[in-house]
Amino acid sequence: MSSSAKRTPPPPVYKARRASLLRSWLWPARSNLGRWAYTMQRVSGVGVSLYFLAHIIETGNVVGGLSMWSVPAYDIAKNNWNNTVDFLKNPLFDLGLVIIGFLLTFHTFNGLRLFFSEFGYGIGKPARPDYPYKPKSQNTLQDLIIWLSAILAALAAVYALNVLFG
Amino acid sequence: MEISLSVSRSTPKRHFEEFTIPLQKGMTVLDALIYAKENLDHSIAMRYSCRMAVCGSCGMKVNGRPMLACYTQISELKSNRIKVEPLDNCAIIRDLVTDFAEFFSHHKSVHPYLIRNDVKEQDNPVKEFLQKPEEVEKYLQYSYCIKCGLCYSACPTVAADKEFPGPQALAQAYRYIADSRDEGIQKRIDVIDTAHGIARCHFAGTCSSVCPKGIDPAQGIQLLRRYTLSLKR
Ligand code: SF4
Ligand code: FES
């Protein structure tokens, strides 16, 4: 960064700012649809990341955890497999999978919307604003994709309900 | 008819105070506040000047949404209970008055003025800088910004990251980058394309939905991001 790019240091952060932080960050009430999508995208992102972590640990367990590098004996592997399957036989985990199905699908489709928007597609062209000011980037196409992501996510969750009975 | 105006007070500790205001035709939220200050409690602190959505001083949260008090008629709120609070994402100085130092420092950081390589020519031009109407359209709406801070206070990323420049500053960066007369693009990219910079925007679009001047910061930010990703202007 060149020296000319240095900005005036921001003033100290006050207590008052911190107090409302969580609300103004994640609470979308009385806001536009895109803001709801923002919260969902953040929450689903964190949820899916945690799931992947748990998934890797779980799968690692099945093949024998860290000892897999030294090729586990067949019995150990079989034992681990059975233990893990027993451990996961729990409606709570099944419910978790249904929720993950919802979050993952929403994150994917809404993520595609964000991806294209970031390259300037579907956000309209700058023009002279006329009353009543309707921002072009908050258009029907964007809203439609957000709703579509939510509907597809709900369908994925319904499909995933199978695990509860399977 | 009367309305009840509930005002957020900061001393001794944050609380709400209720005032009953006689409603008049065409009354704005600011008028109601001025009525309360003149007749009911002189100690209410608020900031205003132009009373016509030009100076950008009277931004506050009205019934939970950032708005200009002078630009919001009570009749359009469709409720006779009105709650006014100071803007989010800013420190409170007193009652409805918030500290904009951080907001302005972000605005200043993006070099919000025309930059030319030939400084001599810029200061003492020998002829006009010509622009086609289509070139003006590219940045015109962003030049209407009155620095009211509504978008800044509505932005969820600003809430989470105080070093993020915020929608107003980023939209101003776009305003000058999109201007065909400007040559300072790299200077601004250096400021905004950082770890806390433009990539932190996740296109919630709340900035655009609250702007009282019809500016679409979310759009400007995405267009600017397109530039940082693909160098396409
Ligand atoms: S972009 Fe709009 S909301 Fe943001 S500071 Fe400028 S006028 Fe206010
Ligand atoms: S008083 Fe100037 S914008 Fe409201």
Image (spheres, coloured by chain):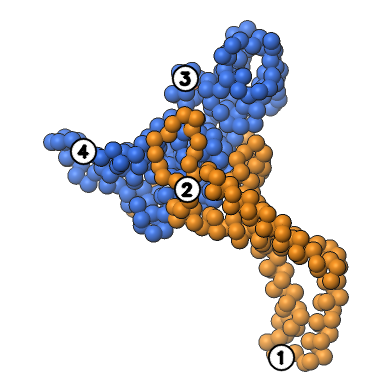
Chain colours: A orange, B blue
- Residue at image coords 22%, 46%: B117
Q: Is mark 3 within 8 Å of ligand 2?
A: yes
Q: CA distance from mark 2 to mark 4?
A: 30 Å
Instruction: Work out whether residue A130 or residue A42 is closer to the camera in this orientation and state it.
Output: A130
Mark 3 vs mark 2: tell me if same chain.
no
The amino acid beneath tag 4 is: Phe
Identify residue for label 4.
Answer: B129
Q: Residues within 10 Å of mark 4 (few under 14, many from 20)?
A: few
The amino acid beneath tag 1 is: Val
Does the image show residue B198? no
- Residue at image coords 86%, 75%: A86
Identify residue for label 2.
Answer: A123
The picture places residue B12, in percent across and down from the top left corner, at 68, 23
Q: Chain of mark 2?
A: A
Mark 2 vs mark 4: tell me if same chain.
no
The amino acid beneath tag 3 is: Met
Q: Nearer the viewer, mark 2 or mark 4?
A: 2
For residue B78, above or below residue B227: above
Is A100 displayed left or right of A83 in the figure?
left
Q: CA distance from mark 3 to mark 2?
A: 30 Å
For residue B26, above or below residue A28: above
Q: Is mark 2 within 8 Å of ligand 1?
A: no
Q: Secondary structure at mark 3?
A: loop
Q: CA distance from mark 4 to mark 3?
A: 32 Å
Q: Quadrant of the N terminus of chain B?
A: top right
Does the image show residue A144? yes
